[in-house]
Amino acid sequence: MRQSTLVIGIPVLVAASAILVSAAMASNTCDSTDETMTAISYSEHGPADEVLTLKSDYPKPVPGKNQVLIQVKASSVNPVDFKLRRNSVPDFLIPKPKIPGADVAGVIVQLGANLEKAANFQIGDRIPNEVDFESAAALPLVSLTVLQSLKKLKNPKDKKILIHAGAGGVGSFAIQYAKKVLGMHVATTASKEKKEIVKDLGADVVID
């Protein structure tokens, strides 16, 4: 969905269309003002065509002290979105109404109190930068998964790593990050039909 807003926590790695997001998991719990925005949400679980509703008067969230408010320029559908919407989940885990959309990209429009003087974030900054919004909107959850998985590696350069399902969303990002950022020797699993794809991403060894 375009031209909506969201609040994301720091670090800026996870996002969801028009909802509050911590460093690891989305939540609808946030303050709001009398201002409104357009958002798609659901108040009960079930098929998309039965439970999703589009509202133009959804309360606009207010960023907390260590958060930023983002105007969403593009979003993508992640499996977690439709699985949480489709399958019954207790309200204390997924407060309702729930706005789906854990993968987004956009522009900062408001800073939390603790970030107003910080140099890392400024109003007008793109989240993320250097790629078009549509491509960037496919990255947040897969990139967060990879970064959290590999951040504790000590002196990873030239070490060997095995990445399963290298042609998948997380796998394809992990291959590139491990090879091109961490300088590791990468082995991955993939079907013979996808061998060249993972090789192009940087895999040194492909196991069928």
Image: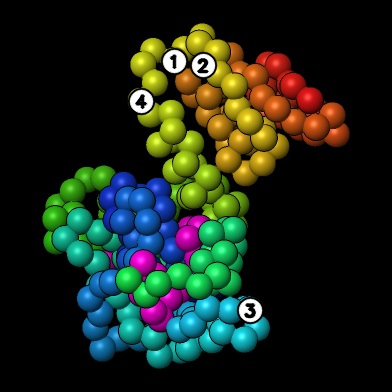
Q: Which mark is residue 156?
A: 1
Name the residue type under label 3: Pro
The quadrant where residue 172 appears: top right
CA distance for labels 1 and 2: 7 Å
Q: Is residue 165 above or below residue 24?
A: above
Q: Which mark is residue 25?
A: none
Residue at the farthest right position:
193
Between disc 3 and disc 1, whose residue precedes?
3
Name the residue type under label 4: Lys
Asked if disc 1 and disc 4 are in contact, CB closer than 8 Å, the reply is no
Name the residue type under label 2: Gly
Q: Which mark is residue 47?
A: 3
The quadrant where residue 57 appears: bottom left
CA distance for labels 3 and 1: 44 Å
Label 3: few (<14), some (14–19) or many (≥20) C-alpha neighbours in 10 Å:
few
Q: Which mark is residue 152?
A: 4
Q: Nearer the viewer, mark 3 or mark 1?
A: 3
Q: Residue at x 24, y 67 (%)?
A: 63
Q: Position of residue 19 (x, y in %)?
A: 37, 69
Q: Say which element carries label 4.
A: loop
Q: Say which element carries label 2.
A: loop
Between disc 3 and disc 2, whose residue precedes?
3
**Magenta residues?**
93-110
